[in-house]
């Protein structure tokens, strides 16, 4: 076979689980498989490279290593770390597991990794570690699984990770997960590419057991990392009620799509009473046509209504944005700024959000969309994403400028207000240039001189 399998030693075996990035949280995607592996009698070493170094001496003594890759950034970091491990221990079986494990698998499989686990990975990983099955190149497991309470032993303490600033207090935070997958199929999202509209709940006792565990470890705030907390509203609300009854001081945040904010509007006042401080919601853009292409299931007017629902409930709303897709214009970005101002949302936006470009990983549902296909160029193996081109050079320039402003602000830890002010100036100037070019092209009545004018002439024709 073209891959390495762990070999069970008479003295027992040891597997190292490595996280590279989990949004500043103690990694639940290490704790969950650690519980399954330890339950099977396998010694498990946990490492979080976002806050600690890889101990080379430990790598020399283990029998297998598995990298958690729940998101794109984690995957990119894991590929680099796995290559180093391969140089050090060419004989060591290496696995990738999680949502992004299959991204770039044709390039990584064999040269970097020996096994890839997507979906519900715990049970297949135990089989792999025990050497009791021979996994194919990519194991996608979507069946219903029995989970154990995540085992957080061996992970850095919660105090090591990002805290939640709330009313002048820096609350110790922990992440728990109540479900995997999502019932929806938004075109740009990596989750449907694996789960295809399926939802897998972790289980009432397991989640409450994990909450009890993190509270004992010092957590004052819990982030539910579910893709959408209201995919299973009765189950999720039940968890919140019981957690609040046991720990009345504990606070929470959740992620919920606009459609669910409105569909379950009657739940929010109770969720506020149960300790939900804020909700993250993927607004993405203020262009209805783009929302339709992405199959988001909401409109711009729904977004405004969602803001009102959350304001009425007294829950802080943190919208996330996907401002730059291939057909974005500077006017679209200026419209996002106007929306933020009209709804008093600017203080809730991380400036880096304003520079985000659409990511198109391998297997993305967007690849088959005609609106997207014409902008695609080639797959970037190092970046693990498809390269695409903007329709408008002005938009490309604007995205780069916003990206530079965000990077510089992050380097010098600039306050959000100052960064957003700098971004506003660039956006406003870019939108003005675009407006003037469109007027110029219309005045000529035909494609103007050079590519920029031609591009705007085309857009002017479409919009008239
Ligand atoms: S609702 Fe959210 S998690 Fe679900 S498919 Fe859409 S973007 Fe992805």
Image: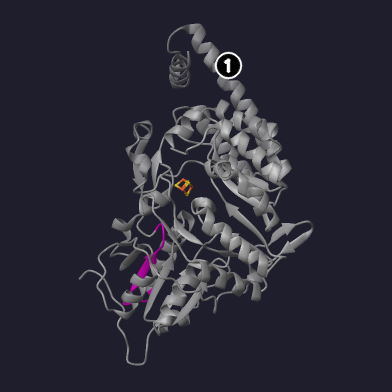
Verify whether residue 30 appears in magenta.
Answer: no
* 419 with respect to 233 (left or right): right
Residue 52: in sight, yes or no?
A: no
- Residue 269, horizontal then vertical, whole percent: 67, 49
Look at the numbered disc 1 and give the secondary structure of its residue. helix
**Residue bearing the label numbered 1:** 436
The answer to whether residue 392 is above or below residue 284 is: above
Residue at x-position 32% and y-position 88%: 9
Residue with the most extreme left position: 1
Within 8 Å: ligand 1 and the Cβ of disc 1?
Answer: no
Q: Is residue 163 left or right of residue 153?
A: right
Relative depth, front residue between 302 and 401: 302
Nearest the viewer among 245 and 254 is: 245
Horizontal side of residue 203 vs 275, given as left or right: left
Asked whether, in this view, residue 76 is left or right of residue 115, the answer is right
| Residue 234 position (above or below residue 161) | above
Q: Which residues are magenta?
A: 88-100
Q: Residue 257, how many percent across, how many down?
A: 53, 45
Q: Is residue 123 visible?
A: yes
Say which residue appears at 61% left-offset and 39% top-offset: 306
Q: How is the image coloured?
A: one colour
Q: Residues within 10 Å of mark 1 (few under 14, many from 20)?
A: few
Residue 98 in the magenta stretch? The answer is yes
Q: Main secondary structure of the magenta part?
A: loop
Residue 388 picture location, percent across and down: 40, 38
Which quadrant: the N terminus? bottom left
* Residue 461 found in image quarter: top left
**Foreground pick, 57 / 96:** 96
Q: Where does residue 450 sit, x and y in percent of width and height?
A: 44, 18
């Amino acid at each position: 076979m073209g891959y390495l399998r762990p070999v069970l030693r008479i003295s027992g075996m040891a597997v190292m689980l490595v996280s590279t990035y989990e949004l500043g949280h103690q990694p639940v995607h290490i704790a969950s498989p650690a519980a399954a592996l330890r339950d099977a009698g396998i010694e498990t070493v946990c490492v979080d490279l976002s806050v600690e170094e890889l101990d080379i001496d430990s790598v020399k003594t283990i029998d297998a290593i598995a990298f958690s890759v729940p998101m794109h950034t984690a995957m990119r970091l894991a590929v680099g770390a796995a290559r180093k491990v391969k140089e050090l221990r060419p004989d060591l079986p290496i696995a990738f597991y999680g949502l992004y494990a299959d991204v770039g698998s044709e390039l990584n499989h064999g040269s970097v990794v020996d096994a890839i686990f997507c979906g519900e990975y715990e049970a297949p990983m135990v089989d792999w570690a025990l050497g009791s099955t021979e996994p194919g190149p990519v194991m996608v497991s979507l069946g219903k699984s029995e989970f154990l309470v995540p085992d957080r032993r061996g992970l850095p303490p919660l105090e090591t990770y990002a805290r939640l600033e709330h009313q002048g207090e820096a609350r110790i935070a922990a992440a728990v997960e109540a479900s995997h997958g999502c019932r929806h199929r938004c075109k740009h999202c990596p989750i449907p590419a694996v789960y295809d509209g399926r939802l897998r709940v972790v289980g009432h006792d397991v989640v409450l057991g994990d909450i009890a565990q993190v509270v004992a470890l010092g957590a004052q705030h819990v982030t539910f990392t579910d893709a959408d907390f209201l995919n299973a509203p009765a189950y999720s609300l039940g968890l919140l009620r019981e957690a609040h009854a046991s720990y009345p001081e504990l606070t929470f945040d959740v992620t919920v799509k606009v459609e669910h904010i409105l569909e379950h509007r009657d739940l929010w006042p109770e969720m506020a009473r149960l300790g939900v401080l804020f909700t993250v919601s993927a607004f993405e853009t203020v262009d209805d046509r783009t929302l339709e292409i992405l199959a988001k299931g909401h409109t711009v007017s729904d977004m405004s209504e969602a803001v009102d629902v959350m304001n009425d409930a007294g829950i802080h709303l943190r919208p996330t944005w996907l401002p730059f897709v291939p057909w974005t214009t500077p006017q679209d970005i200026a419209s996002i700024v106007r929306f933020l101002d009209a709804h008093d949302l600017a203080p809730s936006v991380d400036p880096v959000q304003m520079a985000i470009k659409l990511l198109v990983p391998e297997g993305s549902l967007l690849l088959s969309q005609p609106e997207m296909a014409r902008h695609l160029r080639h797959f970037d193996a190092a970046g693990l994403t498809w390269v695409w081109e903007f329709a408008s050079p002005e938009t490309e320039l604007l995205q780069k400028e916003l990206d530079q402003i965000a990077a510089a602000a992050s380097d010098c830890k600039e306050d959000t207000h100052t960064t957003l002010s700098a971004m506003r100036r660039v956006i406003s100037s870019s939108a003005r240039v675009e407006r003037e070019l469109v007027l110029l092209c219309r005045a000529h009545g035909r494609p103007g001189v050079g590519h920029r004018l031609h591009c705007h002439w085309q857009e002017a024709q479409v919009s008239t």
